[in-house]
């Protein structure tokens, strides 16, 4: 089976992790901060907070922005469930904004209309989570303008998009948002096994997220309610979690970061080859967002004929092509149906779901493997 995604682990990566195992610190040592600083520098953000997953990063990002019970979070229905669940963790309500059909990202026009209606109704969201679907930035210029006009805070879920660019700057620099989140799960662009990071240019948000990552505890005398009892002293100022990244993960991430440009370059090359090779088939190729240069986490084709969707998917799997489907619309998950959502709520997302197939794309995919993927798609569509 040619997998749809896969990590590349080098001998240097292995040596970096092994060195940690022989060192004094397996967690809370010097490598975590080095990894944070390296990512922050790479993407041009002032602060980075490494955590044990992007899901955790989204959670503490929402908390740091003050999301709580009675508040509202909006995101795209075409994303991994974590982009919405982070709102639920905070006790907030979640709603969705339909996607733009060619980029699969949140539709700025739909967002504008929904914000307008919400403003009239006095029920604006506190936070919008803008997902960089497949590694391509949504129209962050328009989304940021809309958010600013309505006083809404913005999180970029760039789990797919480390190494991507938007309007000439790296994704993660938080030019258009309060906080950007990356995932380092093995199918993503670079990996720490499990792991994630929250980036921001706001020192207060960074300090708050650092605290929430570690039980809500501070060792900063200035933040304490009274002078420290002694050198051992710390204070828990609020309720936090243990969302820390280990030193092994940070060392792997730091080592992988050195490969980021090469990984993304290969993904971009493979995507361009797919664009050419699939041009004449009965499917639509991913559309481009103006100003965006994708990291190409996923390459999603959409079949012209919805009725062939399941058959083509099964034929590809049977032929050893590890296709997948990103994503089942979040509002159609039983948990969200239970909250009142249902079929027909977000028709563009639902039509996407009826046609979409993620085909293999990862930095280790060979030209020959890619050719056999193209042949298998062509054959599945012609039978
Ligand atoms: C993978 C992913 C997440 C969650 O990442 P983890 O690191 O596995 O917690 C969140 N959002 C999106 C869009 C993702 O693809």
Image (cartoon, rainbow, N blue to C red):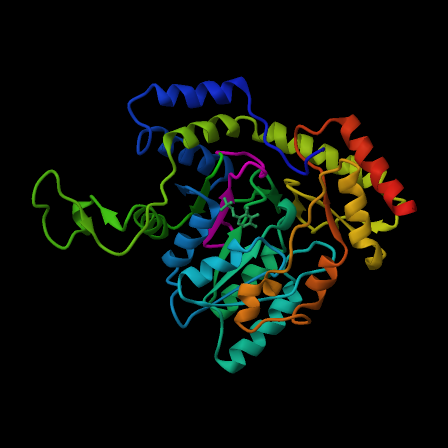
Instruction: Kindly identify the residue that appears in the image at 36 percent across and 41 percent down.
Output: 244
Q: Is residue 369 left or right of residue 74?
A: right
Give the residues in magenta: 173-192
Residue placed farthest to the left in the image?
229
Which residue of the protein is positioned furthest toward the right in this rendering? 382
Give the position of the N terminus as an image quadrant.
Answer: top right
Q: Answer whether residue 180 is magenta in the image.
A: yes
- Count every numbered label the image shows and give the total: 0
Most frequent secondary structure within the magenta stretch: loop
Is residue 333 highlighted in magenta? no
Which of the pair 16/6 is nearer the observer? 6
Side of 302 relative to 77 (left or right): right
Residue at screen point 81% across, 32% down? 372
Residue located at (39% from left, 19% from top): 19
Please determine whether, in this image, residue 71 is positioned above or below residue 382.
below
Residue most extreme to the bottom: 121
Determine the image quadrant of residue 247.
top left
Residue 153: image x %, image y %? 46, 62
Can I make out residue 176 in this image? no
User: Would you say 210 lies left or right of 58 here?
Assistant: left
Residue 278 locus on image (x, y percent): 84, 42
The residue sitting at 48% across, 40% down in the picture is 44
Query: As drawn, is 215 to the left or to the right of 141?
Result: left
| Closer to the camera in the image, 94 or 177 | 94
Residue 56 visible in this rendered orientation of the protein: yes
**Image quarter for residue 234?**
top left
Q: Position of residue 288 (x, y in %)?
A: 73, 49
Q: Residue furthest front?
A: 318
């Amino acid at each position: 089976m040619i997998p749809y995604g896969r990590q590349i682990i080098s001998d240097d990566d292995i040596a970096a992790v092994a060195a940690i195992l022989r060192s004094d610190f397996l967690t809370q040592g010097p490598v975590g901060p080095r990894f944070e600083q390296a990512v922050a520098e790479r993407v041009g953000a002032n602060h980075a907070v490494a955590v044990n997953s992007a899901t955790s990063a989204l959670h503490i990002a929402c908390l740091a922005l003050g999301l709580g019970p009675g508040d509202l979070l909006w995101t795209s229905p075409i994303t991994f469930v974590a982009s919405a669940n982070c709102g639920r963790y905070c006790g907030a309500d979640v709603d969705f904004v339909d996607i733009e059909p060619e980029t699969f990202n949140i539709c700025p026009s739909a967002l504008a209309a929904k914000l307008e209606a919400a403003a009239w109704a006095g029920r604006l969201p506190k936070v919008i989570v803008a997902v960089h679907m497949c590694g391509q930035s949504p129209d962050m210029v328009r989304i940021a303008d809309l958010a600013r006009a309505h006083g809404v805070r913005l999180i970029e879920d760039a789990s797919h998009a480390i190494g991507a660019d938007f309007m000439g700057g790296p994704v993660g620099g938080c030019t258009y948002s309060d906080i950007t989140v990356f995932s380092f799960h093995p199918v993503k662009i670079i990996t720490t096994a499990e792991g994630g990071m929250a980036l921001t240019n706001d020192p207060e948000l960074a300090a708050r997220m650092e605290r929430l990552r570690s039980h809500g505890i501070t060792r900063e005398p200035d933040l304490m309610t009274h002078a420290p009892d002694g050198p051992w002293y710390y204070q828990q100022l609020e309720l936090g979690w243990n969302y820390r990244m280990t030193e092994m993960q940070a060392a792997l991430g730091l080592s992988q970061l050195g490969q980021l440009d090469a990984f993304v370059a290969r993904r971009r090359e493979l995507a361009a080859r797919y664009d050419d090779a699939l041009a004449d088939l009965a499917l639509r190729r991913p559309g481009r967002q103006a100003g965006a240069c994708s990291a190409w986490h996923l390459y999603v084709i959409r079949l012209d004929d919805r009725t062939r969707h399941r058959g083509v998917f099964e034929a590809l799997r049977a032929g050893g092509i590890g296709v997948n489907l990103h994503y089942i619309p979040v509002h159609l998950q039983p948990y969200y149906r239970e909250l009142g959502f249902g079929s027909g709520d977000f028709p563009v997302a639902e039509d996407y779901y009826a046609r979409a197939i993620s085909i293999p794309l990862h930095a280790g995919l060979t030209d020959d493997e890619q050719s056999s993927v193209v042949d298998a798609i062509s054959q599945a569509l012609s039978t």
